[in-house]
Image (cartoon, grey):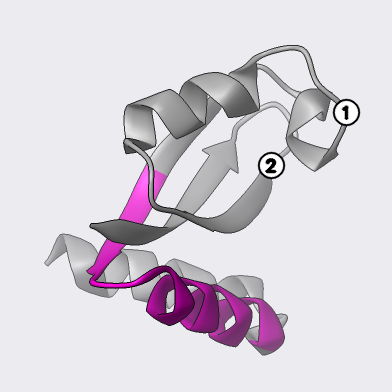
Amino acid sequence: MCFCYILFSQSLNKYYIGHSCEDLNERLRKHLSDHKGFTSKAKDWIIIHRENYNSKSEAYKREKEIKAWKSKSKILQLIKNSAE
């Protein structure tokens, strides 16, 4: 199972969109660890949205689609709709 996921950092008021085929809790742990990259800027990331996919290529395609929106309001609508 692979995932497209969205993280949120309250301290940065930012979203991060990614994909992975590993356990999402383990992936989150890596985002929260000391490393270089965008998510290293905060230690309060939480998973606020996830979508399941059968392949890495499908998850990556969805990640690229969401990132192409370049719209915080569209991301918020996606999160809201998934919570209903």
Residue 4 position within the rendered picture, expressed as x and y whole percent measured from the top left: 42, 63
Which residue was labeled with disc 1? 36
Which residue is at 23% across, 72% downward? Answer: 54
Q: Note whether 17 is above or below 78 in the view shown.
A: above
Q: Circle 2 sits on which residue? A: 13
Q: As shown in the figure, which amino acid type bears the numbered disc 2? A: Asn
Depth order, front residue of 84/39: 39
At label 1, the amino acid type is: Lys
The magenta segment = 48-68
Q: Is residue 74 visible?
A: no
Check the image and report above or below for 35 versus 39: above
How many numbered marks appear? 2
Query: What residue is shown at x 52% (from left), y 73% (from top)?
Result: 60
Residue 56 lies in what quarter of the image?
bottom left
Q: Tell me, yes or no, whether the highlighted magenta stretch contains residue 59.
A: yes
Spatial CA distance of label 2 from label 1 is 19 Å
Do the CB atoms of the residues marked 2 and 1 lie less than 8 Å apart?
A: no
- Residue 71, percent from left and from top: 66, 80
Q: Left or right: where does residue 23 sit relative to residue 36?
A: left
Looking at the image, which residue is at 24% across and 74% down? Answer: 81
Q: Earlier in the sequence, mark 2 or mark 1?
A: 2
Dot 1 surroundings within 10 Å: few (below 14), some, or many (20 or more)? few
Question: In the drawing, does residue 50 fall left or right of residue 64?
Answer: left
Element at badge 2?
loop
- Could you tell me if residue 36 is visible in this image? yes
